Amino acid sequence: RRLERSGSWKSTVYLGPLDYDELIDYNAELEQAIDFGWPIVSQVSRFLLILLIAAHQYIPNYGWLIVLFALVIKIIVYPLTHKTYESAARMQELQPKITALREKYKNDNQRLSRETMNLYKEEGVNPLGGCLPLLLQMPIFMSLYNLFSKTIELRQAPFTLWIQDLSLPDELFIAGFGLHVLPLLMSVSMFIQQKMTMKDPKQAMLVYMMPVMMIFIFWSMSAGLVLYWTIFNVLTIGQQLLVNHLKKDAAS
């Protein structure tokens, strides 16, 4: 805004912590000062922050709230993941037919692709169905990343045992050396989960590579974010065990 020499301009300056509730109380849209990233992620982040602050009045530990939140999300996406497991099982049943097609059309990639898609269509299998639950998780994952890195409410928020600040990487000192335990636990949970679901020998390397890669990706991330992902993996393992048990009962 341009001012004339004789003009004046009144403004309000806020110097203080980016406490969401406190900023809301000013009724001046000061809460917009908290940068939650892209529009969709920003809306999800604000919703989750309001939800966590409200729930914190009844469960005064953000760590247990994250565990509860992971459980709620798992229940919500359960129908999708259940269909994903069914689709994966059907894909395994189709492997002999797919192998036969590859052998039959090994010199004609276009025909192979066309016949493979026709097979999927005939059998009612979606080869990309397993990606949907992960795609739904990404906005939540990015929103939680923003929450733990940009909101003061979660700063120095303890959970239990060695996890004393959910906004920072967890650190357990063993023989004088600091070790981030949660990324290791998350990696183990991912390995078990993939070991239970991946049956294709061609994907065997992914079972070992992905968990190792995730250690490096999550190593410096906040404990709260890694806690959420670890709990979600554990719940997914439990879901897979339940599905396997029900299949065994149905077969017998």
Image: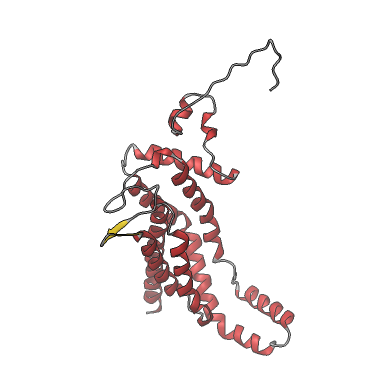
**In x, y percent, where is residue 182?**
36, 59
Indicate the quadrant where residue 176 lies: bottom left
40 sits to left or right of 148: right
Q: Which of 157 and 48 is in front in this view?
A: 157
Q: For the point 31% across and 52% down, which residue is it? A: 163
**In x, y percent, where is residue 45?**
50, 43
Q: For the point 41% across and 51% down, which residue is it? A: 222
**Quarter of the picture holding the N terminus:** top right
Q: Residue furthest bottom?
A: 104
**In x, y percent, where is residue 122?**
64, 75
Q: Which of 176 and 125 is in front in this view?
A: 176
Q: Which residue lies furthest to the top in this view?
A: 6
162 sits to left or right of 36: left
174 sits to left or right of 212: left
Indicate the quadrant where residue 196 lies: bottom left
Q: For the point 34% across and 60% down, which residue is it? A: 181
Q: For the point 60% across and 75% down, which residue is it? A: 123
**Quarter of the picture holding the C terminus:** bottom left
Label tally: 0
**In x, y percent, where is residue 174?**
27, 61
Q: Nearer the viewer, residue 198 or 84?
A: 198
Indicate the quadrant where residue 21 lies: top left
